């Protein structure tokens, strides 16, 4: 797995990511390290009686049943979303590890920020295409926590693979101080380009809108072993630009005009011709899927996700997932209904998702005498937010309702969020998320 191998092996813990790719089946020494890490971090120690049985189990399982186990692992993490832009300290209820950008967020989980009086925010991106922003600024608001909604449609196979690959790369970046997520104020674009025999690529896109003339570009290789850096010049004379690169790989380029003004932040995956067909099919599918999500739920980090997906293709980052026991546990919503000291969470009727027409949405709470506060402008509800008295009409194209409940002598419920969209004629409600018509899954 190239540079991902060692760092990702360290994630082989009960609540993190396990790599079930080829090295586990072929390298006995790798397997021993895996068993040692797995048992020591999951059980606290590697008992003598566990070492050989565990070793034998994994070796036999991945030798004779790799496909079935991979399928089980895929199923276990198929519904997981992605944490993005985490500010402050957050945890999933019942887990000790803090949440970082790229971590898996199971639908139905309860997100709990620490209660320090400081800004906290986290964006959760779910595989049904929805995007949720949770934030709090006071101890009182943070103490409620935030419930991640369940999926309203089933993610397709390509979606599962794409998000698993993106999570892999994001986690790797979080572990590598030398490769942080880079911010840029320039127009950004990602390109998958074929490197020809002359070691040149052609790129259109944003570059097509540049005026003809002379430009230079700063080239940075993302391969730490070969930090290639140069400032070559080129002439733009048509709808595309031709750039020279030393070899196949990942490159970050800045296009600079003749007045020394940076114009475009370009991320390029340069591939040999033999890989073009498979890579282009996968990347174009991912682009179409993310564009569709962003058109329905604006705010997806498309540029960062496209770059992470290209990195995963180039590094052949395999789909990773949580261990089955932890995945099952974390995937179960920890409902506060049976906890007598916490007010029950508000429930939406009808459930959030696609609606066929304008609809009145009612809120219900199972705690007698509870008061439900809500917002419909996207902001987080607080103690001073409007009190629910009557159903809320969903008109136009979309409405986001956020609510929590409070009652005397009990703690406030977590904040729940419902996104309601009126179905357009072109939308197929039965179509699983990520299964784009007339496209093969990768």
Image (cartoon, grey):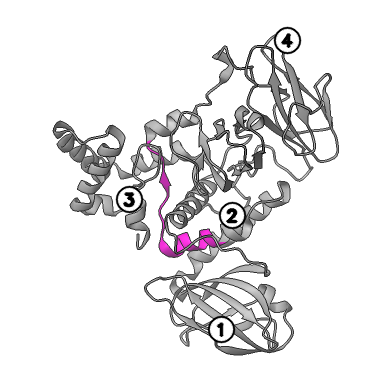
- Which element type, helix, strand or loop, lies under badge 4? loop
Decide which of tag 1 and tag 3 comes sooner along the chain: 3
Q: CA distance from mark 2 to mark 1?
A: 31 Å
Decide which of tag 4 and tag 3 comes sooner along the chain: 3
In this view, the residue in front, 437 or 197, is: 197
Left or right of residue 350, residue 432 in this image: left
Q: CA distance from mark 1 to mark 4?
A: 68 Å
Residue 397, image x, y percentages: 81, 41
Q: Which residues are magenta?
A: 307-323
- Circles 1 and 3 in contact, beta carbons < 8 Å: no
Q: Which residue is mark 1?
A: 243
Q: Which residue is mark 2?
A: 439
Q: Which residue is mark 4?
A: 369
Left or right of residue 435, residue 351 in this image: right
- Which element type, helix, strand or loop, lies under badge 1? strand
Residue 278, image x, y percentages: 48, 64
State the quadrant of the N terminus.
bottom left
Local crowd size for mark 4, using a 10 Å CA cut-off: few (<14), some (14–19), many (≥20): few
- Circles 4 and 2 in contact, beta carbons < 8 Å: no
Q: How many marks?
A: 4
Q: Nearer the viewer, mark 2 or mark 3?
A: 3
């Amino acid at each position: 797995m190239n540079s991902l191998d060692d760092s990702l092996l360290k994630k082989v813990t009960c609540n993190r990511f396990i790599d079930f790719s080829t090295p586990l089946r072929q390298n006995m020494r790798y397997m021993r390290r895996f068993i040692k890490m797995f048992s020591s971090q999951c059980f606290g120690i590697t008992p003598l009686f566990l070492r050989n049985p565990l070793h034998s189990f994994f070796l036999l399982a991945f030798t004779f049943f790799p496909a079935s186990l991979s399928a089980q692992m895929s199923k276990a993490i198929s519904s997981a979303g992605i944490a993005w832009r985490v500010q402050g300290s957050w945890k999933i209820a019942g887990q000790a590890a803090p949440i970082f950008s790229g971590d898996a967020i199971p639908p139905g989980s309860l997100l709990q920020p620490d209660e320090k009086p400081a800004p906290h925010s986290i964006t959760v991106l779910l595989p049904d295409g929805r995007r949720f922003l949770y934030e709090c600024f006071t101890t009182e608001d943070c103490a409620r926590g935030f419930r991640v909604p369940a999926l309203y449609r089933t993610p397709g196979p390509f979606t599962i693979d794409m998000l698993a690959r993106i999570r892999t790369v994001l986690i790797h970046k979080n572990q590598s101080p030398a490769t942080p997520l880079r911010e840029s104020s320039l127009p950004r674009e990602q390109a998958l380009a074929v490197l020809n025999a002359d070691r040149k690529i052609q790129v259109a896109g944003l570059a097509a809108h540049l005026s003809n003339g002379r430009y230079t570009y700063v080239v940075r290789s993302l391969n730490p072993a070969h930090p290639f850096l140069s400032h070559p010049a080129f002439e733009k004379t048509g709808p595309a630009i031709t750039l020279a690169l030393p070899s196949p790989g990942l490159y970050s380029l800045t296009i600079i005009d003749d007045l020394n003004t940076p114009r475009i932040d370009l991320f390029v995956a340069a591939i040999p011709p033999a890989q073009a067909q498979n890579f282009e099919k996968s990347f174009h599918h991912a682009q179409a899927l993310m564009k569709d999500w962003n058109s329905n739920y604006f705010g997806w980090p498309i540029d960062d996700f496209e770059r992470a997906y290209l990195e995963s293709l180039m590094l052949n980052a395999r789909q990773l997932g949580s261990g089955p026991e932890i995945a099952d546990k974390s995937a179960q919503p920890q409902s506060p209904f049976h906890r007598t000291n916490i007010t029950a969470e508000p429930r939406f009727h009808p459930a959030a998702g696609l609606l066929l027409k304008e609809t009145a949405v009612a809120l219900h709470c199972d705690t007698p005498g509870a008061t439900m506060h809500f917002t419909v402008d996207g902001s987080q509800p607080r103690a001073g937010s409007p009190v629910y008295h009557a159903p809320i009409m969903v008109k136009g194209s979309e409405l986001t309702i956020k609510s929590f409940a409070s009652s005397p002598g009990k703690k406030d419920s977590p904040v729940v969020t419902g996104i309601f969209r009126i179905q357009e004629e072109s939308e197929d409600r039965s179509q699983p998320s990520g299964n784009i018509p007339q496209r093969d899954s990768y």
